[in-house]
Image (tube, rainbow, N blue to C red):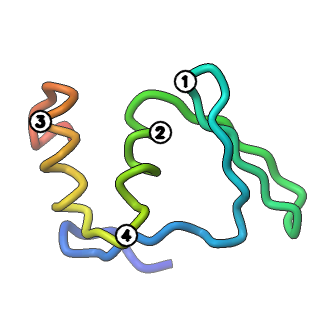
Amino acid sequence: MSPIEPATLIVRDLDLIAAEMDGDLVMMSIERGEYFGIGGVGTRAWELLVEPATVDQLCVVVCDEFDVDADVC
């Protein structure tokens, strides 16, 4: 697996079926038999990835919307 750098392009895994439940996001991979649940920043990142984005692009939005320092992000 390649390291994730600020310029790394992130895309949604098209194998995942996702649905919002009570403000959180639940995702399932039928092919892999896996289930995931995410909330907060993870839910927002999934929303932002409706179009592929770089790590830097995601961090700009996350830092603004969640009042977090860029180094932490």
As measured in the structure, the alpha-carbon distance from the residue carrying label 1 to the one carrying label 3 is: 20 Å
Query: Three-letter amino acid code at disc 4?
Result: Glu
Q: Earlier in the sequence, mark 4 or mark 3?
A: 4
Spatial distance from mark 2 to mark 1, Cα to Cα?
8 Å
The answer to whether mark 4 and mark 3 are in CB contact below 8 A is no
Q: Where, quadrant-wise, is the C terminus in this rendering? A: top left
First in sequence, mark 4 or 2: give its number: 2
In this picture, residue 25 sits left or right of residue 4: right
Q: Dot 1, crowdedness within 10 Å: few (<14), some or many (≥20)?
A: few
Tell me if residue 48 comes above or below residue 9 in the rendering. above
Give the residue pinned by disc 3: 64
Q: Locate residue 54, reporting x and y percent.
A: 25, 69
Q: Which residue is mark 2?
A: 43
Three-letter amino acid code at the position of disc 3: Asp
Q: Secondary structure at mark 4?
A: loop
Residue identified by numbered label 1: 23
Q: Which of marks 1 and 4 precedes in the sequence?
A: 1
User: How much space separates mark 4 and mark 1, taking CA atoms?
Assistant: 21 Å
Helix, strand or loop under label 1: loop
Q: Position of residue 41 (x, y in %)?
A: 38, 35
Q: Residue furthest top?
A: 22
Say if 20 sits above or below 58 in the image: above
Query: Is the residue under label 1 in contact with that under label 2 (CB below 8 Å)?
Result: yes
- Residue at position x 58%, y 28% in the image: 24
User: Spatial distance from mark 4 to mark 3, Cα to Cα?
Assistant: 19 Å
Q: Dot 4 corresponds to which residue?
A: 51
Question: Residue 4 got which mark?
Answer: none
Residue at left 17%, top 61%?
56
Q: Are marks 2 and 3 in contact (CB under 8 Å)?
A: no
Q: Earlier in the sequence, mark 2 or mark 1?
A: 1
